[in-house]
Image (tube, rainbow, N blue to C red):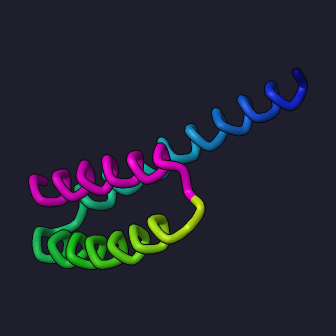
Amino acid sequence: MKDLQEATERICELKGSLIALDALMTAVLHALPEAERHDAMRRFAMHAEVARTVLLHGSVSDHTIAAFEHDVKRLAAFGAGS
């Protein structure tokens, strides 16, 4: 039971960290002028493609890949619509 509790706590810590990073990234994107935001999103798309390749060729769960794809689409939509 202790291992399950430790794993649950760690997952919660990771979720909190991701939420904080998400808030930071959306704030940074929102603060950028349109031209710089467009450039950042272009670079993000390139880096996301590299990450996608690594994920698809590694031993990563389908849940992780699905979450990655969901957030890439969400951030791309945010960057395009801000």
**Measured from the top left, where is residue 79 in percent x and y?**
19, 59
- Out of 76 and 39, give the one closest to the viewer: 76
Q: Which residues are magenta?
A: 60-82
Instruction: Determine if residue 23 is in view.
Output: no
Q: Measured along the vertical axis of the image, is residue 70 above or below residue 38?
A: above
Q: Main secondary structure of the magenta part?
A: helix
In the image, is 33 to the left or to the right of 59?
A: left
In the image, what residue occupies the spot 15% across and 72% down?
38
The answer to whether one can see residue 54 in this image is yes
Left or right: 77 in relation to 50 = left
Is 67 displayed left or right of 35 in the figure? right
Q: Residue at x 80, y 25 (%)?
A: 5
Count up the numbered dots: 0
Question: Where the C terminus falls, by quadrant?
Answer: bottom left
Q: Quadrant of residue 50?
A: bottom left
Q: Nearer the viewer, residue 4 or 78?
A: 4
Q: Residue 36's spot in the image, x, y percent?
A: 19, 76
- Name the one closer to the observer, 73 or 41: 73
Q: Which residue appears farthest toward the right when viewing the image?
A: 2
* Residue 33 placement (x, y as % from top left): 15, 69
Q: Please tell me which residue is depicted at 25% across the width and 48% down the height of the picture.
A: 74
Percent position of residue 1, x then y:
88, 21
Side of 9 relative to 48 (left or right): right
Indicate whether 72 appears above or below 58.
above
Looking at the rendering, which quadrant does residue 49 occupy? bottom left
Residue 74 sits inside the magenta stretch: yes
What residue is at 31 percent from the left and 47 percent from the top?
70
- The outermost residue toward the top is 1
